[in-house]
Image (cartoon, rainbow, N blue to C red):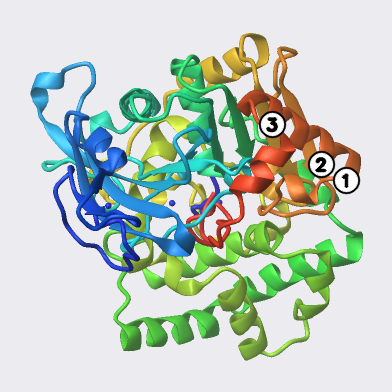
């Protein structure tokens, strides 16, 4: 995965106008609109309360919908359930009992204070949405943490238990989605539990099938946009490394002033600086576009101009102990199973100091560094190509993470590439005919009509770009 995360996601309240998290029993009742003396039972809390191990933490009602924060007791090790449990955090955006459900796997943690938002499939379908915090992120980390249980099968098994539990509440169709690492997570769940959902929409999901064979990434950087833009980006990296002594001194001073350290991650400010410079061009294409090539400073720019541009695009503070801490589970997964882009950086030969720096073991604590097992990604890739069904992949033409893609099978599965799009590519950015085709496929998988979806989508809930933040895969 990029050396960015890069290397490159309700206690029941009275059914009145609830705006905060208010606890109430599962059998809470509310006054009838026609007769104060009569009551009506709210069935949703009762259904949730009946699920073993599920706890309703809070409920709010944004945009007139119901939004629950939940936890589910999960085995630390699904192969050995006796080894203990942990609490996995998830959220539920409820529209109606008969609407389809979108399972959103972000691949990272949910926000500290989750707010209701909807993915593109949720909005298109007028669906309910279940969002899952990946094991080992934020509060969904076993204590003590057995890092050997952080693998793609264990997380897929977490999601399987969530789906099976909530199918006692929602009996309709289920669609899984996620972007970037969340898209990968949705693919892995589909591979291990293909009967859980009725279709998958995976956005910008990298497929590092053979970890060292990363020619596709080098080819991407050799051909993206036009030659003049590529030359400017190469030059700004070269100039930063040529001016290393002065720029590292500035970075050391800023790190000392702001309390950044390096002992648990890169080790020194100089290594942190080099990693950030190596990452700058990847970061540019991941979240910018060709129109912003004009903002790249020329080789004749001042030290301040070069430093500030790299800091804006890649962020020196990211490659610090503080910046990396949240993403350690991702880097551990990249090192052990997921893989990462191994770039050659031919244009920087003679300017770099740390061979092999651009890889996940460089940024995680020494006790977590590990060898890479190639088998899981080869297995998933083969299954997607040959046996999978009802899978849709959406990539961005100018997104480096989209350089190594999944190849879907011929079993009602599809691949789309959004022209000129970066890591934020989605169905809405496809050419019109492809957008319509992809949307029709999604409706068919979910068993809804466009009219039904439009009727359910009326509530004013913000869309979610499905990326935990700009640093993600």
Question: Badges 2 and 3: C-beta atoms under 8 Å apart?
Answer: no
Distance (Cα) linking label 3 and label 1: 18 Å
- Is 373 in front, or is 131? 131
- Residue denoted by label 3: 443
Point out the residue furthest to the top here: 387
* Depicted 375 relative to depicted 435: above or below: above
Which residue does the image show at 82% across and 65% down from the upper left?
290
Is the residue marked by circle 1 packed among few (<14), some (14-19), or many (20+) residues within 10 Å? few
Residue 435 tag number: 2
* Depicted 387 relative to depicted 13: above or below: above
Percent of width and height locating residue 449: 71, 33
- Residue denoted by label 1: 431
Is the residue marked by circle 3 packed among few (<14), some (14-19), or many (20+) residues within 10 Å? some
Q: Earlier in the sequence, mark 2 or mark 3?
A: 2
Distance (Cα) linking label 2 and label 1: 6 Å
Which residue does the image show at 46% across and 45% down from the upper left?
106
Q: Is residue 465 visible?
A: yes
**What is the secondary structure assignment of the residue under circle 1?**
loop
């Amino acid at each position: 995965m990029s050396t960015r995360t890069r290397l490159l996601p309700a206690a029941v309240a009275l059914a009145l106008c609830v705006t905060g998290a208010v606890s109430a029993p599962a059998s809470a009742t509310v006054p009838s609109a026609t007769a104060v003396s009569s009551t009506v039972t709210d069935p949703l809390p009762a259904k949730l309360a009946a699920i073993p191990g599920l706890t309703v933490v809070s409920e709010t009602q944004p945009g007139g919908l119901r939004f629950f924060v939940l936890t589910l007791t999960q085995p630390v090790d699904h192969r050995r359930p006796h080894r203990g449990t942990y609490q996995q955090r998830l959220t539920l955006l409820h529209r109606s009992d008969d609407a389809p459900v979108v399972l959103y796997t972000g691949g990272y943690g949910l926000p500290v204070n989750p707010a209701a938002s909807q993915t593109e499939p949720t909005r298109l379908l007028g669906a309910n949405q279940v969002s899952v915090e990946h094991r080992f992120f934020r509060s969904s980390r076993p204590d003590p943490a057995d890092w050997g249980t952080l693998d793609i099968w264990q997380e897929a098994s977490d999601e399987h238990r969530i789906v099976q539990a909530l199918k006692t509440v929602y009996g309709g169709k289920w669609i899984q989605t996620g972007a970037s690492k969340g898209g990968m997570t949705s693919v892995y769940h589909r591979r291990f539990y293909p009967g859980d959902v009725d279709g998958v929409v995976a956005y910008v999901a990298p497929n590092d099938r053979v970890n060292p064979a990363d020619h596709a990434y080098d080819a991407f950087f050799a051909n993206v946009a036009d030659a003049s833009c590529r030359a400017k980006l190469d030059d700004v990296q070269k100039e930063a490394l040529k001016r290393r002594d002065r720029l590292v001194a500035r970075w050391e001073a800023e790190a000392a002033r702001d309390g950044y350290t390096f002992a648990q991650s890169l080790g020194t400010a100089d290594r942190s600086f080099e990693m950030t410079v190596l990452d700058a061009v990847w970061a540019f294409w991941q979240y910018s576009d060709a129109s912003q090539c004009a903002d790249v400073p020329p080789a004749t720019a001042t030290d301040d101009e070069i430093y500030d541009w790299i800091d804006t695009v890649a962020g020196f503070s990211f490659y610090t102990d503080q910046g990396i801490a949240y993403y350690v589970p991702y880097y551990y997964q990249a090192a052990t199973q997921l893989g990462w882009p191994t770039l050659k950086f031919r244009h920087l030969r003679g300017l770099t100091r740390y061979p092999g720096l651009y890889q996940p073991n460089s940024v995680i604590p020494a006790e977590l560094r590990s060898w890479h097992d190639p088998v899981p990604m080869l297995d998933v890739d083969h299954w997607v190509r040959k046996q999978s069904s009802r899978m849709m992949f959406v990539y961005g033409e100018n997104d480096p993470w989209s350089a190594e893609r999944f190849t879907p099978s011929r079993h009602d599965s599809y691949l789309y590439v959004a022209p000129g799009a970066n890591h934020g590519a989605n169905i809405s950015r496809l050419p019109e005919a492809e957008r319509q085709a992809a949307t029709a496929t999604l409706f068919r998988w979910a068993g809804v009509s466009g009219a039904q979806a439009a009727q359910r989508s009326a509530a004013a809930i913000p869309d979610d770009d499905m990326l935990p933040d700009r640093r993600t895969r």
